[in-house]
Image (cartoon, rainbow, N blue to C red):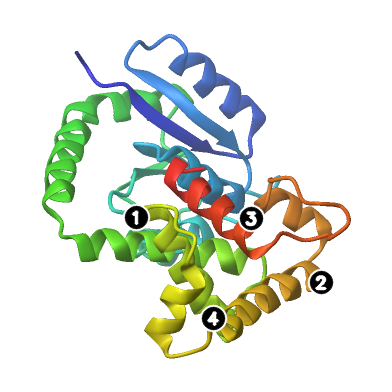
Amino acid sequence: MEKTLHILLIEDDMNTCNRISNYIATKDNMDLAGVTNNSYVGIQYVQNTLPDAVILDLELHHGGGNGLFFLSDLNKLGLEKKPYILVTTYNSSKITLESARRLGADFIIGKYEDSYSPESAVDFLEQLLPMIEMTESTSNTSYMKDNQKDLEQGLIRRIHRELELIGISPKVVGYKYLTDAIMITIDGPTTNISQILGNKYKKSNSSVERAMQNAINRAWNSNDTETLLTCYTAHINPDRGMPTIKEFIYFYAEKITDGR
């Protein structure tokens, strides 16, 4: 059975978005993973949907950020398999286009070219579908052969991103304890996390717990409510106003395991 190519569209021209969306809807071997005019939202789509390909406009004047920011942020994610990046742009600057290539753009189509149309970008990706599918198959095989250390490093990077999104800095002592605690819980829930961490770092159970709760408290006291509600969606006891250590650890262990 032929693979369905999941495409993320990052484009700020509404007419182009509509034409590409409508054209992809006619294809049995493609679907849209998302549409946005904001490069930062595009990164969130990549994390949440893991698209096979991205149609990326470099200029996002009516949205947010730009295509170069997206490519730079994409590199920072440390993904096992990056999506194929098809850049479409009116920009003809050699410096800008070379920067896009250096940041990871796989191919660039000039919107100023006579042969360009929004539909032609989709046709281009459809022609590459067998190669993209082959690359993914190779990547999956390699992934299965990766050792446990590589897998753990990927999880740790994801945990670090989540902690830093809500303002828990690597400089805070509780940062490393929370990272380890979430990793332990991903492997299997346990009731003696503080003891395990205390033994590892040669600290008392109470000092480990205090450091973790202080890190959580600081995040909730210093961050804006909207950010916290976006990143942390679990119920919080209104009398406390912030999650307990156990609630926090279990939420992120489940979030990362589920790939949310």
Image marks 4 and 2: residues in contact by CB distance under 8 Å: no
Please give the label number shown on residue 247.
3
Q: Earlier in the sequence, mark 1 or mark 3?
A: 1
Quadrant housing the N terminus: top left
The amino acid sitting under disc 3 is Glu
Between circles 4 and 1, the one closer to the viewer is 4
The residue drawn where x is 64% and y is 55% is 247
In this figure, which residue is indicated by the disc labeled 1? 79
Image marks 1 and 2: residues in contact by CB distance under 8 Å: no
Between circles 4 and 3, the one closer to the viewer is 4
- Horizontally, residue 58 falls left or right of residue 211, namely left
Please give the label number shown on residue 27.
none
The amino acid sitting under disc 2 is Asn
Between circles 4 and 2, the one closer to the viewer is 4
Q: CA distance from mark 1 to mark 3?
A: 28 Å
In this figure, which residue is indicated by the disc labeled 2? 221
Can I make out residue 143 in this image? yes
Q: Earlier in the sequence, mark 4 or mark 3?
A: 4
In this figure, which residue is indicated by the disc labeled 4? 205
- Residue 165 to residue 222: above or below: above
Q: Earlier in the sequence, mark 4 or mark 2?
A: 4
Q: Earlier in the sequence, mark 1 or mark 2?
A: 1
x, y (%) of residue 191?
A: 49, 60
Q: CA distance from mark 4 to mark 3?
A: 18 Å
Between circles 1 and 2, the one closer to the viewer is 2
x, y (%) of residue 233?
A: 69, 46
Around disc 4, counting alpha carbons within 10 Å, would you say few (fewer than 14), some (14 to 19), or many (20 or more)?
Answer: some
Most foreground residue, 49 or 59 = 49
Image marks 4 and 3: residues in contact by CB distance under 8 Å: no
Around disc 2, counting alpha carbons within 10 Å, would you say few (fewer than 14), some (14 to 19), or many (20 or more)?
Answer: few
Image marks 1 and 3: residues in contact by CB distance under 8 Å: no
Q: CA distance from mark 2 to mark 3?
A: 17 Å
